[in-house]
């Protein structure tokens, strides 16, 4: 299958299997989708559906047993090289677990710059903090001195500091208080538009996906159930019973258009 021009991510027949023999767990089975440049694309499904495993397979944290992943038309290498991580970064679900508890914000942000040989470290750190709405006063704090929303802003700043074009977002607000979730989602939305970023967002929350994503796939038991547009999601147009059940379960939580 040829990759259309301007396609930053193509996943074709992706399968992920953990273990072997009778005890093998097929976590993802023949999943495929294509993202357009600058698009925000969602993956939804219940816990254990394989949605987060797809993100981990893309960034090299889960084994690909079949299929292919292409970034800008080129198959990704295993292991992932430095060029991949300058182009693709991931924001994890739990901002406290993803930040080293004994590293200051300054160290969290400076380490990727040192690893990848970036200059202008001072200016880049200050700009990264400003981009996520944190001032200089946060630079030398430790994670335990930050609120959950502030920690996730630091995690987003760390992902953006290498100037990637693609962000993989694994339930980026599910560990946050409801009052903070909208702030972080609005920040991510503004950053995408300002930097022309491409997002691949995993969430169990259909309200988050309806707010953030133009298109999405629904997963169940490691497989794709169907693909929907944002308009389909908001109008509750679904072909499959499983998707209709998800929509029914989320009734009252999917935001209507402004």
Image (cartoon, rainbow, N blue to C red):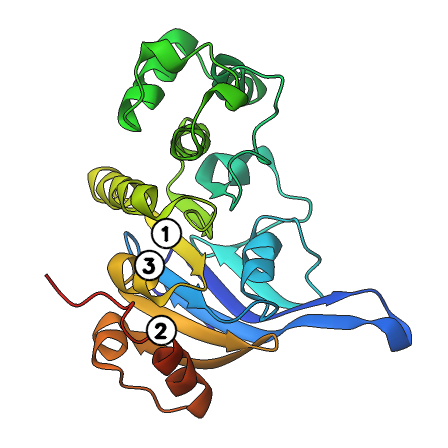
| Residue 241, x across and y down, in percent | 43, 91
Q: Residue at x 40, y 46 (%)?
A: 166
Q: Secondary structure at mark 3?
A: helix
User: Does 32 appear above or below 147?
Assistant: below
What is the x, y in percent for residue 124?
36, 16
**The one of 151 and 195 positioned closer to us in this rendering:** 151
Which numbered disc flags the more N-terminal residue, 1 or 3?
1
| Marks 3 and 2, the one that precedes in the sequence | 3
State the quadrant of the C terminus: bottom left
Q: Which residue is more in the foreground, 96 or 56?
A: 96
Q: Which mark is residue 199?
A: 1
Residue 196: give x, y in percent of width and height. 25, 43
Q: Would residue 255 be found to the left or right of residue 170 on screen? A: left
Q: Quadrant of residue 229?
A: bottom left
Q: List x then y, in percent, for residue 94.
A: 53, 42
Crowding at dot 3, Cα within 10 Å, few <14 / some 14-19 / many 20+, comes out as many
């Amino acid at each position: 299958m040829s990759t259309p021009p301007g396609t930053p991510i193509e996943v074709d027949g992706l399968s992920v299997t953990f273990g072997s023999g009778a005890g093998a767990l097929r976590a993802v089975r023949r999943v495929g989708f294509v993202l357009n440049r600058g698009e925000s694309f969602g993956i939804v499904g219940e816990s254990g559906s394989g949605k987060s495993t797809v993100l981990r397979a893309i960034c090299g944290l889960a084994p690909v047993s079949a299929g292919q992943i292409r970034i800008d038309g080129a198959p990704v290498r295993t292991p992932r090289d430095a060029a991949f991580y300058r182009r693709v970064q991931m924001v994890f679900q739990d901002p406290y677990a993803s930040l080293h508890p004994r590293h200051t914000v300054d160290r969290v942000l400076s380490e990727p710059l040192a690893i990848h040989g970036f200059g202008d470290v001072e200016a880049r750190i200050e700009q990264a903090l400003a981009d996520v709405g944190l001032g200089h006063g946060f630079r030398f704090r430790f994670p335990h001195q930050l609120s959950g929303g502030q920690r996730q802003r630091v995690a987003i700043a760390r992902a953006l500091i290498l100037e990637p074009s693609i962000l993989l977002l694994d339930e980026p607000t599910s560990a946050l208080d409801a009052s903070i979730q909208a702030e972080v989602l609005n920040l991510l939305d503004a950053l995408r538009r300002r930097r022309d970023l491409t997002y691949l967002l995993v969430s169990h929350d259909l309200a988050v996906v309806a707010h953030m994503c133009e298109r999405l796939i629904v997963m169940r038991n490691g497989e794709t159930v169907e693909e929907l547009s944002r308009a389909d999601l908001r109008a509750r147009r679904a072909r499959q019973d499983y998707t209709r059940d998800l929509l029914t379960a989320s009734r009252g939580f999917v935001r209507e258009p402004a």
